[in-house]
Amino acid sequence: MRAFKFAMDVPPSRQAKLFAACDALCEWRYHLLILLSAQRAANRKRLAAGEPPEAWLAQTDLYKLVTDARAENDKLGSLHTHLVQNVCIRVIEGTKRWLEAIAEGDTGKRPPPHRDPRKYRSFTFPEYGNGCRINNGRILLSGFGWFKLHDHRKIRGRPKTITVKFAQGRWWCTVTTLTQEHDWFGPKLANNQRPVGAGVDP
């Protein structure tokens, strides 16, 4: 994986919409943390009563959760579905890793923490081409429009994700790509055989 970072040209009149998206996703993240905390408390009570705990959210449950949230919340409803799903997946996966660490005796791990809304200033499109793409030095973000990229250069590899972030007083986009590694040593041969035509070691 490789990452390519570009500064975005975002006029002041259009920045408010990007900030509003970050605020809405931060609120959604906080809602998920409360939901999962309540689920853990309920499971503790079930275990104490000798009952089996409730299963974690499956992918179908996740999609329904996001669909319901976007239908009930206009702020989330105005955002691309993948942005809302990405926050949900990150929180749930982080919580699972924490619980798995506890089960293995690692008490140093912590659940995903609540983020200060003033510092929550990024969002990720997890699937390039679905809600986001780059063309001729400009980036298209679904729901936000086109933005010019400064110092745009050729992106090597197959684009996978795009993260938009406000830092150092301006907006940036980071494109992660999947690149194929070169095999500098050639194919591995069985029984230490030498390739045909290879010279003799001195």
Image (cartoon, rainbow, N blue to C red):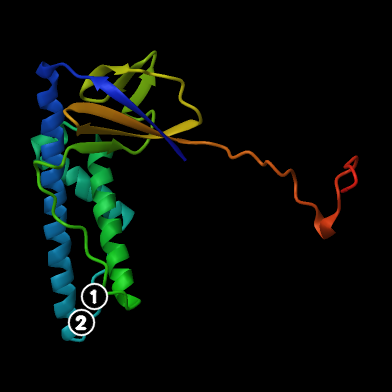
- Between 19 and 193, the one lying in front of the other is 193
Residue at 21% x, 86% y: name it: 50
Q: Which residue is mark 2?
A: 47
Asked if one can make out residue 57 in the rendered structure from this viewpoint, the answer is no
Q: Which disc is residue 53 wearing?
A: 1
Residues tagged 1 and 2 counted as in contact (Cβ below 8 A): yes
Q: Which disc is residue 64 wearing?
A: none
Quadrant location of residue 56?
bottom left
Residue at 9% x, 43% y: name it: 117
Q: Residues within 10 Å of mark 1 (few under 14, many from 20)?
A: some
Residue at 9% x, 25% y: name it: 16
Type of amino acid under label 1 = Pro
Task: Indicate the secondary structure of the residue bearing disc 1.
Answer: loop
Where in the figure is residue 10, as x and y percent of width and height? 19, 19
Where in the figure is residue 78, as x and y percent of width and height? 15, 31
Q: Residue furthest top?
A: 136
Asked if one can make out residue 198 in the rendered structure from this viewpoint, the answer is yes
Where in the figure is residue 2, as x and y percent of width and height? 45, 37
Where in the figure is residue 173, as x and y percent of width and height? 30, 29
Task: Indicate the secondary structure of the residue bearing disc 2.
Answer: helix
- Between 171 and 133, the one lying in front of the other is 171
- Between 8 and 144, the one lying in front of the other is 8
CA separation, marks 1 and 2? 6 Å
Residue 200's place in the image compared with 177, above or below, is below
Quadrant location of residue 53?
bottom left
Q: Is 4 displayed left or right of 158 in the figure?
A: left
Q: Earlier in the sequence, mark 1 or mark 2?
A: 2
Residue at 68% x, 41% y: name it: 184
